[in-house]
Amino acid sequence: TAAANGTGKTLYSGNVPLTTNSRTTGGFELKDPTRGNTYTLNMSNRTSGGGIVTDADNTWGNNATSDSASAAADAQYGTAVTWDYFKNVHGRSGIRNDGVGAYNRVHYGRSYANAFWSDSCFCMTYGDGDGRSLRPLVSLDVAGHEMTHGVTSRTAGLIYSGESGGLNEATSDIFGTMVEFHAASGTDVGDYLIGEKVMISRAYLRNMVKPSADGSSADCWYSGVGNLDVHLSSGVANHFYFLLAEGTQSSYGASPTCRSTDTRVATGSDALNGIGRAKAAAIWYRALTTKMTSNTNFAAARRATVAAAEELYGIGSTESTAVARAWTAVNVN
Ligand code: ASN
Ligand code: ZN
Ligand code: CA
């Protein structure tokens, strides 16, 4: 293999650099020898088979769906940024931490309005959306979300139902968002919304600032929150994470705590100051990979993250105190 510098003309990130493979037989393939040989297959609207995406001049796509290579460029870029995020920030070499890249399948099925991670193929699959409410699901936050399911599966193994399922989903929203913030190139700037680039009929899929703003997600823990769909109970931990990283009031918005009334932002002694994204992510990653297990619930996640913060920053540190306060702010005691 021979790494080459290409350009992706993506749907959601503008034009970005892509490391590709120069084939001995001529031309290029969408495969990155510098990131565990992660590559992208075009499924051509089928659900099995597929072929690696190739190109003659190493410029991929045209920033529009009229060229099938555009979504492929987004997916390959998403894989690269996710790889770099876990490697450079957390020292994790690939989803299994074994240096091997996962692969992508794009243009899966017809009008397929979802994306998913699969442990069995060790691969990512992206649909093109239905064209009415959803565009192709290849944005950075969705890519980071889905690949993080692979990391969770290989570490804490959080069971995908009940409160552990909400924590599993929140872990994917948290690191999907951190991946979006980590992108060094392109036009998809970081925010605390999930799926804002792919939605047509709504503004976003989920909102970490105030999860209930979507009409269904939980902002606060209550007995029975674990009976919600895992994409809605995740709101409790997404809300916790936002308060920990950014506080009750930031440039990303106002995040009401559950201790005051749920409609106004906490003031005075209820107000929280964020510790920043880097520390919040380090705490969540350490908790996920060294403390949480398959049955961890919200109360246990509080203990896990407080312990992780104490190990990283010290007992009684500003950071460990902020973790405890942010959980209390979402009713997890
Ligand atoms: N896109 C969904 C998710 O990652 C699909 C799934 O695997 N549940 O939550
Ligand atoms: Zn998910
Ligand atoms: Ca986003």
Image: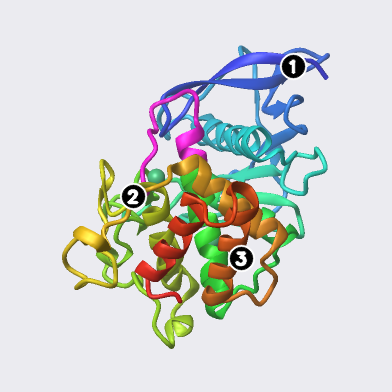
- Magenta highlight on residue 189: yes
Q: Is the magenta stretch mostly helix, strand or loop?
A: loop
Instruction: Assign the C terminus to one quadrant of the image.
Output: bottom left
Residue at the spot of label 3: 304
Query: Is residue 140 something that shows in the picture?
Result: no
Between residues 248 and 25, which one lies in front from this camera angle? 248
Q: How far apart are the two marked residues, 2 and 1, measured between alpha carbons?
A: 44 Å
In the picture, the disc for residue 166 is none
Between residues 213 and 286, which one lies in front from this camera angle? 286
Question: Is residue 148 depicted above or below 61 in this figure?
Answer: below
Percent position of residue 309, x then y: 58, 54
In the rendered structure, are the residues bearing label 3 and label 1 in contact, judged by CB atoms less than 8 Å apart? no
Question: Is residue 231 depicted above or below 79 in this figure?
Answer: below
Which is closer to the viewer, label 3 or label 1? 3
In the picture, the disc for residue 3 is 1
Instruction: Assign the N terminus to one quadrant of the image.
Output: top right
Query: Within 8 Å of ligand 2, the CB of disc 3?
Result: no
Start-end of magenta stretch: 179-192
Percent position of residue 331, x then y: 38, 75
Q: Is residue 50 left or right of residue 17?
A: right
Q: How many labels does the image show?
A: 3
Mark positioned earlier in the residue sequence (2 or 1)? 1
- Magenta highlight on residue 27: no
Question: Is residue 170 depicted above or below 26 in this figure?
Answer: below
